[in-house]
Image (cartoon, rainbow, N blue to C red):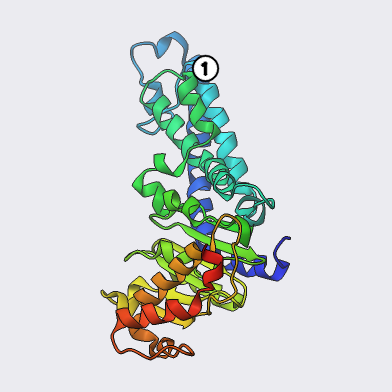
Amino acid sequence: MPSDPAAVAAALAAVAPAFSAWRSAVAATAEEVRGLLARQAAGDGAAAALGSFAAGRIDVGRFVGLAVRRAPADPAAAEAMRRAAAVLSALAGAPAGEQCVVRVAAGTSMRDAVHDAWRRLGRAFGAAHAVGLVQQGRAATEAEEGLVRGLAPGLWTRRERRVAPPLVVDVAGADLDVGALLAGLDGGAKVVLLVSGPCAPAPLVRLVTPGTFVLQTSDPAELAVLSKVAGPAVAALVPEDAAAFVHEPARGPTLSTRLVLRRVPKGAGRGPVGPWSAAQQAEELAQLVALGATDVPALASVPGVPAVDDPAGRVATWLLGAVDWKDLG
């Protein structure tokens, strides 16, 4: 079922600065391309007006104030630039709610939905690449024109990744696949996952790396922190029975300073969720506890199991008490 509209609104507000940066870059590029085409048209008009007098005597491009890079005279290449300008203008003009919200239909692939969304938004970068190729004097071949149809994150430049378009992914817990985000979590990428229904307890733990901000929470108000994160960031709004934690790269150089566990649920009674077995869910939760063991001394207090002092022992003790071993067979 779709997420609550208030949650969607909170997610869009959280990624608003990232969307604004991307749209500003797209709008500026569209304006530059339109300017090139307009100056080319002005140059053609000036050449016609000057007639034979200008031939061999006047640099018409310089006469009408053309930039160093100018639109091509070749009709096919000029048409490719006009299509690129149209793509850029359309993307710059549409609101975030129409472009950044990805709703994954129940039982379908989140990986495909996210990939398609990034390619669609990547049309902006593809259009810019096509214009660059034309300006270099290369023919407007099908391959070059195809750039306008979409560009996956793996083909974005470092500069483009810094202004990566954000995504808000509305997905059922059974269809949640955080691996779908790996290709795009770079530069300034921002992703919010709105998870509905039962889900694994700690899916985002697999995304914890030194430079990536990761937030798993049940409080929509906490999503606002993404608007202040400079680097790649992903946040998930999850049900109350999932874990809650935050990994903030800016907090310090060590994992113990960066990762804070706020809630760690027990795994007893958990069954499979989508393709994720109880054992896989237990592994994710155990990994989260292991990473943040120094911050959660209370986790050693599992009923019926003696407490231990060392972090590794605490994790093992917790895992024994948290997993419903009947589900692991």
What residue appears at the point 43 percent right and 8 percent down from the top-left corner? 52
Q: Secondary structure at mark 1?
A: helix
Residue marked by disc 1: 76
Q: Is residue 47 left or right of residue 312?
A: right
Q: Is residue 78 above or below residue 184?
A: above
Q: Is residue 159 above or below residue 137?
A: below
What residue appears at the point 62 percent right and 50 percent down from the top-left corner? 99
* Residue 181 image point, x, y percent: 48, 53
Specify the amino acid type for callout 1.
Ala
What residue appears at the point 57 percent right and 57 percent down from the top-left corner? 176
Q: Is residue 295 left or right of residue 43?
A: left
Q: Nearer the viewer, residue 306 or 234?
A: 306
Q: Is residue 246 above or below residue 199?
A: below
Q: Is residue 213 above or below residue 157?
A: below
* Residue 326 image point, x, y percent: 55, 69
What residue appears at the point 66 percent right and 69 percent down from the top-left corner? 7
Q: Nearer the viewer, residue 194 or 176?
A: 176
Quadrant the N terminus occupies: bottom right
* Residue 312 image point, x, y percent: 31, 78
Asked whether residue 3 appears in the rendered view, the answer is yes
Q: Residues within 10 Å of mark 1 (few under 14, many from 20)?
A: some
* Residue 167 image point, x, y percent: 55, 56
Q: Is residue 124 left or right of residue 9?
A: left
Residue placed farthest to the top in the image?
52
Rendered image quadrant of residue 290:
bottom left
